[in-house]
Image: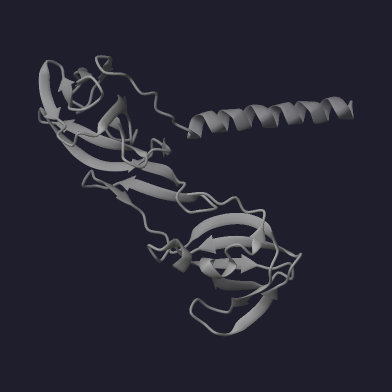
Amino acid sequence: MRRIKAWSVLMLCLFFQSLYAQGTEKRVIMLGPGKKAQADLDGDGKVEIVTLYAKPGGHRWAIWVNDDKVFVDSSSIDFDGFNVIDLDTTDKYKEIVVRLNGPCTDFYVIYEFRNKSIRKIGAVGEVAQFCGDGSIIVKDYSMSFWTRTLKYVLTRQRTIELVPQEFYYVGKEGVVEKGFPIYAKRGSKVVVDIAKPGEKVLILLSDCSSEEPEQNWYLIKTERNILGWIYMKTFGGKIGGLVWGG
């Protein structure tokens, strides 16, 4: 009987976990050129038909709402798809999102349609979760060995802006291969501990204060639960188990 109860509890937990994941993760399916999306964009009670047409190769695309061409792109960036999203389910508006192929990475450009005209309200990176509460969570994979989580919000002025964070969570663990000191404060010369070869360390945070990745400070916890700061250029190549990328 206890096994049955335990199994039932496990199944309920998995069920609610799946519901939670479905309710919080909003992925956008991109529509190709010539496809149609229908929604009341400006909250006037009338449904608009949104279409995006692109020239062969994806260059020079245009957004049409109903039978009117409301926007023509002049950037010559490849078009990858579009759709209608609802950034904030508590307001009456819907937005048009266009996915573009940038020189280094893809990204989304977001527009609003009001008074029979279209306006760009922001742009975010390619790995984006549109949460439906006015926020967008974006994964930034340019941080060498970890993924930075960025948060954007739709402001009262209906522009999409990045919410600055003093620190960014890293959460990567590795084994020290070559010892190094960690410091009491960023910029301090006071050593609080030495990360010794063979011990596990946890890289908790980064301040992302510099455009040069090697100049960013990282907060590291040693096996003795001592916290200290260190430049990436100091521990780079000295911690095993980290997967380094671009």
Q: Position of residue 59 (x, y in %)?
A: 21, 27
Looking at the rendered structure, the number of numbered marks drawn on it comes to 0
In front of the other: 8 or 139: 139
Horizontally, residue 108 falls left or right of residue 141, namely: left
Q: Splitting the image into 4 quarters, where does residue 60 fall?
A: top left
Q: Position of residue 176 (x, y in %)?
A: 70, 64
Residue 94 appearing in the image: no
- Please identify the quadrant where the N terminus is shown: top right
Horizontally, residue 129 falls left or right of residue 95, namely: right
Name the residue rendered at 70%, 69% in the picture: 225
Name the residue rendered at 55%, 32% in the picture: 21
In front of the other: 57 or 118: 57
- Among all residues in the image, which is located at the extreme bottom? 190
Q: How is the image coloured?
A: one colour
Q: Splitting the image into 4 quarters, where does residue 224 fall?
A: bottom right
Q: Position of residue 191 (x, y in %)?
A: 62, 82
Residue 105 appearing in the image: yes
Q: Splitting the image into 4 quarters, where does residue 237 fall?
A: bottom right
Image: 188 above or below 110: below
Name the residue rendered at 10%, 27% in the picture: 116
Image: 119 above or below 214: above
- Among all residues in the image, which is located at the extreme right? 1
Q: Position of residue 68 (x, y in %)?
A: 10, 20
Horizontally, residue 68 falls left or right of residue 141, namely: left
Image: 18 above or below 151: above
Horizontally, residue 183 falls left or right of residue 127, namely: right
